[in-house]
């Protein structure tokens, strides 16, 4: 059981388990966006579904993403020191299921798991159908235990679809991550 536990929780397994379940539900109640993160190291590229993303500073413009240390994406970002954050059209919600394990990259058709992409100015892949994208250069990787919080500076960005296109959020799916 993962602590710490507040003083009001009795030091017994059932009490701690009950607190653990509630803590998980509170964490699941946090609202999130849902993105595809593009990564690149040399000629290796990947795309990964991710919701742990946020802007973390105005000056400079910094974005942070929490990436599982076991993910292929983690290896690529650690090595390549860049990532892209793809904002997904709400209509394209089905694609998030296609980016939950290392993707098949086809450099003849320029597709990631069949989805057309191009390389951004950092070299990280950007999905052609993303509403918008942010390209980041890693400035500060923070070790968070099971995950690394990669803090990157926005070095390029743009819209690829009209700005009023609704973008995907966690609540548009039945999926959850966290807790
Ligand atoms: C809805 C959803 C949200 C996710 N959010 C994250 C996340 O924020 N961070 C993360 O490391 N993995 C997240 N994952 C898991 C990754 O998409 C992926 O399964 C795993 O990390 C392996 O990625 P890889 O292709 O880089 O090996 C999420 C998965 C789903 C289905």
Image (spheres, helix red, strand yellow):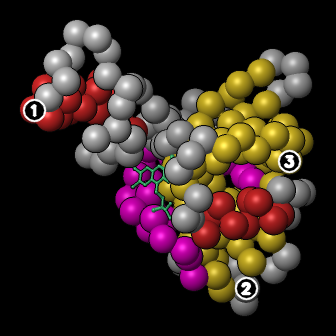
Residues at discs 1 and 3 in contact (Cβ within 8 Å): no
Magenta highlight on residue 93: yes
Which percent across, then down, holds residue 55?
A: 69, 28
Position of 131 with respect to 17 (left or right) is right
Front-most of residues 143 and 152: 143
Q: Mark 2 points at which residue?
A: 107
Nearer to me, 126 or 100: 100
Q: Distance between the residues labelled 2 and 3?
A: 23 Å
52 part of magenta stretch: no
Residue at coordinates 67% horizontally, 44% vertically from top-left?
Answer: 143
Q: Give the range drawn in magenta.
A: 83-104
Residue 131, visible in the rendered structure: no
In the rendered image, which residue does mark 3 sit on?
137
Q: In this view, does 117 lie to the left or right of 69?
A: right
Rendering coords of residue 139 (x, y %): 86, 41
Separation of residues labelled 1 and 3 (CA atoms): 45 Å
Assign the N terminus to one quadrant of the image.
top left
Residue at 88 percent across and 57 percent down: it is 122
- Label 1 belongs to which residue? 14
The residue under the point 75% across, 54% down is 83
């Amino acid at each position: 059981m993962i602590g710490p536990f507040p003083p009001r929780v009795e030091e017994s397994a059932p009490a701690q388990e009950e607190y653990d379940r509630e803590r998980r539900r509170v964490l699941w109640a946090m609202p999130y966006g849902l993105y595809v993160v593009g990564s690149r190291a040399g000629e290796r590229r990947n795309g990964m579904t991710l919701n742990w993303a946020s802007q973390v500073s105005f000056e400079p413009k910094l974005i942070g993403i929490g990436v599982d240390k076991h993910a292929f994406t983690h290896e690529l970002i650690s090595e390549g020191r860049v990532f892209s954050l793809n904002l997904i059209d709400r209509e394209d919600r089905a694609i998030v299921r296609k980016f939950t394990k290392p993707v098949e990259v086809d450099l003849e058709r320029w597709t990631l798991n069949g989805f057309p992409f191009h390389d951004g100015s950092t070299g990280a892949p950007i999905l052609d159908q993303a509403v918008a994208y942010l390209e980041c250069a890693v400035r500060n990787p923070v070790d968070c235990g099971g995950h690394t919080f990669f803090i990157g500076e926005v070095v390029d960005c743009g819209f690829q679809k009209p700005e009023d296109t609704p973008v995907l959020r966690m609540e548009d799916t039945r999926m959850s991550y966290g807790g």
